[in-house]
Image: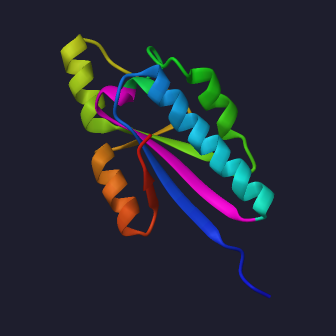
Amino acid sequence: MSERKQHRVVIQVSENDPKIMNLALNNAENLAKFYEQSGEAAQIEIVAYGPGLNMVRSDTSPVKDRLAALVGRPQPITFTGCGNTMSAQSKQEGKDISLLPETNLVPTGIGRIVQLQEQGWTYIRP
């Protein structure tokens, strides 16, 4: 019996633009649905950094309801936020910033993308 194929996709969000954020979420949902219907497994991670960190900030996210809805899927979509950006924005705005509870924090968003690509993940930037 053949082993079930595993797809791994990382999607970059580095712009503070709700259209880009929604496009990234549409891409992730469409991919997850496609692989579910194909009977194949998928890991999908959206990495937000720079101005795109607003996507996963608890105070500024224009897509927080969509993020919460995607986490409990059979093939979950994970969200990652950049610690460097969070520190810089916190200092710039003079307040503590928190990320949505669905978000994993990494030291550097671009470093996370490179790490995943080196592990064979497919890279997408909507």
The count of marks equals: 0
Residue 6 appears in the picture as rendered: yes
For residue 122, side relative to residue 7 (left or right): left
Residue drawn at (40%, 23%), measured in percent from left and top? Answer: 54
Name the outermost residue toward the top: 94
Q: State the residue in front, 99 or 31.
A: 31
Residue 36 in magenta stretch = no
Read off the magenta span.
Answer: 40-53
For residue 94, side relative to residue 98 (left or right): left
Vertical position of residue 84 compared to residue 116: above or below: above
> Residue 113: percent from the left, percent from the top?
36, 53
Q: Determine the image quadrant of residue 52.
A: top left
The colour scheme is rainbow
Residue drawn at (36%, 20%), measured in percent from left and top? Answer: 97
Residue 50 in magenta stretch = yes
> Residue 92: percent from the left, percent from the top?
19, 16
Q: State the residue in front, 84 or 32.
A: 32
Vertical position of residue 44 compared to residue 38: above or below: above
> Residue 29: percent from the left, percent from the top?
65, 42
Vertical position of residue 39 compared to residue 4: above or below: above
Residue 56 appears in the picture as rendered: no
| The C terminus - image quarter | top left
Q: Determine the image quadrant of residue 37.
A: bottom right
> Residue 31: percent from the left, percent from the top?
64, 50
Q: State the residue in front, 98 or 78.
A: 78
Residue drawn at (55%, 22%), measured in percent from left and top? Answer: 63
Q: Determine the image quadrant of residue 125.
A: top left
Residue drawn at (30%, 29%), measured in percent from left and top? Answer: 86
